[in-house]
Amino acid sequence: MYEYKVEVYKVKEAEAKMNELAKSGWRVIEVSPNMAMGYGIVVTFEREKQ
């Protein structure tokens, strides 16, 4: 079974946040532009449920 997390980032902060979550076992499965706000990105992560 998997669990998912959806985060919204400004582009400049995204790399550091994504690397931080990767150390906790999360992997990025999708990145898309944040159309609702007009800037930034929406990142979806998944990992096996612990």
Image: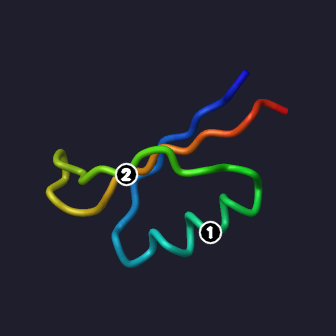
The reply, left or right, for residue 12 in relation to residue 20 is: left
Asked if residue 22 is positioned above or below residue 30 in the image, the reply reads below
In the image, what residue type sits under mark 1? Asn
State which tag comes first along the sequence, 2 or 1.
1
Colour scheme employed for the rendering of this structure: rainbow
Q: Under tag 2, what secondary structure?
A: strand
Residue 42 place in picture, x, y as percent = 36, 50
Q: Residue at x 66, y 59 (%)?
A: 21
Real-space CA distance between mark 2 and mark 1, rounded to the nearest whole angstrom = 14 Å
Which quarter of the picture shows residue 9?
Answer: bottom left
What amino acid type should be assigned to the residue bearing mark 2?
Val
Q: Which residue is mark 1?
A: 19
Give the position of the C terminus as an image quadrant: top right
Residue 3 is tagged as none
> Which secondary structure lies at badge 1?
helix
Residue lying at the far top in this picture: please name it.
1
Whether residues under marks 2 and 1 lie with C-beta atoms below 8 angstroms apart, the answer is no
Is 39 left or right of 9, judged from the image as shown? left
Q: Is residue 46 above or below residue 32?
A: above
Q: Residue furthest bottom?
A: 12
Q: Residue at x 56, y 75 (%)?
A: 16
Question: Which residue is rendered at x = 32% and y = 57% of the image?
Answer: 41
Which circle marks residue 31 in the picture? 2
